[in-house]
Image (cartoon, helix red, strand yellow):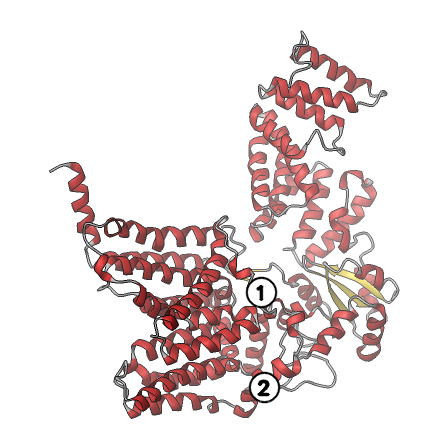
Amino acid sequence: MPFKQRCERLNETITNQRHFLFALISFFFLILIYYFITWPIVGYDTDLWYHLSGGRYFWQNGTIAADAFFSYVLPPKSWYNYYWLFQVIVYKLYQWTGYHGLVGLRCFLYFLTILFICLFFLNRGQYRTKQAISLFFFICYPMALIFRELLVRPHLFSYLFIVVFLYILELKRDKIWLLPILGSLWCNIHGIEYPVMIIIVFAYLAEMYYRDFKKEAPYHTDSKSTKWLMILTIYTVLFTPHFVELIKTPFNISYGNALYQQLYVSELIPIDFRYIFTFSVLPFSNLIVTFQHFLVLASMGFFLICLWKRCLRISHLIIFSSSLLLLIKYNRFIYEFILLSIPLVRHGICLLIKPCDDTKTGFFFRAAPVLMILIMIVIPWLTYASQFKDRPEYPFAQINLPTGVTTFLNSLDAGGAILNEPNTGGYMQWGLNKKYKIFMDMQLAIFNDRDFAFVNSALNDENVFRLFCQKYAPSFLSVSLERSQFKNMIEKFPEFKPVFFDDKEVLYVNARHFPQIAAAYELRQIDPFRVNHIRYEKETREHLSQIFAEAMKMRNIYADGVVTNTIIANILIVNKEYEKALPYGENVIFRYPDFGAGYAIKADALFGLERFREAAVCYLAAIETGKVSQITSRNIYRNLHVCYIRVKEYKKAYQAIAKYVNPFNLSSDYKDIYELGMAAAAAGKLRDGVNFLKIAEMKLPPEDAEYSKKIKENLRMFDPEGKMENTQ
């Protein structure tokens, strides 16, 4: 038998096995579980921590929090805690297992959600064409949901409940007895989403009664008990501690407390439908947004196709129309929209794909297995690998959180009111002990637009700040390092002294309330807002010693800060204490591997120790992160160029110096251009070397005899006969 025929027969044997599709799906789920179970809890927002705080309150007091127990806001705020059961679950899980348990919960809920979506699209009896297309649509969903599924918030349960409800009502009516149980859980875990639950159940109920009225054959055998169970599911809204308050909550938040929330909460900005038509592939993490946009457009397309073919089901019409209204309201509802459209998409695929073209001699029949492997393994692997390429500290990464400020405050024998940043208020209330109160977090069911405007303006405007102090007399201020103008404003209130900062916020103390804290910890040598502007090599040894002492004092309290470790390491490097600087760089790399600072510190220390090959590896790692300042980037390329020169890799040296020296840039120094010319010549690019030396000679000041001599000597060496004088 010819080799080609043997290969075709082997391919048929493998792909015709009933376990082929199961193996592909299993492999995909292994990829999904691996990346999600190995990714830590990261502070993309601080909602998780106010949920943990609410859960701690429940277990310590035996009652659901009904007021802002963590805040000193006046008048006191009362509210209905519509996610109380979620808080109870996550806190107890955290208490038993720490952040590892929260990572596991997130992975488990994501896995279940994707599993039920898979059941919508998976059918081993399908022809290969339909199978491959169904799998492509299926794989879009786990990719599109990645961003939201990384946040441990109540919506993780809501997304799962949406898919399970749709699956039971669409395909598994014999399991409908589960809906009242799931509905009760849903309304207590994430009660504000009860309108979505009602829309789903109402849509299928309306379809049943419509078919009864028209005396049409139903899609399923729908008994009276089925309908009563569905009606009971709607009434599970009443199976909550304060159902009247719950029913009002979605409307109170949107049209009462936070009427203008779309102006200051990014996920609540109305969607720009022009943005839906943008697609990107590279880097592969961009596929996440691309798949979101594709599913939105595909859902709308299938709706129009079903409408045109006059086979649009009542349930699909109601659900699609309702989800479209949600999508128009806020951009975060794109996730609810694509999930609620799953039955419509599945129905549309069935209408469009006909099995009659799937012959065993067709090209698509032979190519389908390869396409399935590409769809189920290659695309997910590339997307997940790109999104999760630099794993921070596991299982909890302190990125974007004021962990240092809370550690410092808890170390003090103090307490009182803190004027805080609302965006990090969730973590502040969780991390601080009971002696402290914050002003607000981002729970818009508690706080209103005016509360946010008051605190946000107080941190920017001296008149509002003065009013805030008159009303609340805060003992501490915790201010984002991004508010660079705050330093100028707070100087008009000399009673507030900066005493500590971490990678996110700087802490001020009211010296009138705690003079001993101000005297012991006031920052006199380091300006937290201008740390990146310190020129260590230009500072006097005495001033460097003073900066070092302040940084070490902070590090002794909180050892994990990138900024303090960077300050200490840079001073040690300037003092040529390279061995001592290495551990500080390694500390930053361990905790923040996606930041360039740690690699740059370690590389500079290795450079000073003349371990040039190791230094070059670290410099390249710093560049790879893409998270270094422009000044640091220039220093990295300059030192990388020297590393390659010292290990005699001249071509790489030329490539490195060319990254930061542009001879045609008006600000380029003649000494740098000279080095560029020498690197070009060493790499065998003599013509480039001569041209760059000539440009350096043009910029040469008359008084620099040393460089004048160097340039002339090297020009004579590279071009002794002057043949390159007028050539390009």
Q: Tell me the quadrant of the picture where the C terminus can be found.
A: top right
Q: Are marks 1 and 2 in contact (CB under 8 Å)?
A: no
| 167, 633: nearer the viewer | 167
- Residue 310: quarter of image: bottom left
Q: Is residue 72 left or right of residue 519?
A: left
Q: Residues within 10 Å of mark 2 (few under 14, many from 20)?
A: many
- Residue drawn at 58 percent across, 65 percent down: 272
Rendered location of residue 677, percent (x, y): 67, 22
The percent position of residue 130, horizontal first and vertical second, equals 28, 61
Marks counted in the figure total 2
Residue behind mark 2:
80
Give percent across and percent down for residue 477.
76, 68
Does residue 418 appear in this view? no
Drawn side of residue 227 relative to residue 11, left or right:
right
Q: Which is in the foreground here, disc 1 or disc 2?
A: 1
Q: Please, is residue 632 above or below residue 208 in the view?
A: above
Location of the N terminus (image quadrant): top left
Mark 1 Cα shell of 10 Å, populated few (<14), some (14-19), many (≥20): few
The residue that appears at 32% across and 91% down in the rendered structure is 213
CA separation in Å, label 1 and label 2: 32 Å
Q: What label does residue 272 carry, if any?
A: 1
Q: Dot 2 lies on which element?
A: loop
Q: Could you tell me the amino acid type at mark 1?
A: Asp
Where, by quadrant of the figure, is residue 183 drawn?
Answer: bottom left
Asked if residue 652 is positioned above or below residue 291 in the image, the reply reads above
Q: Secondary structure at mark 1?
A: loop
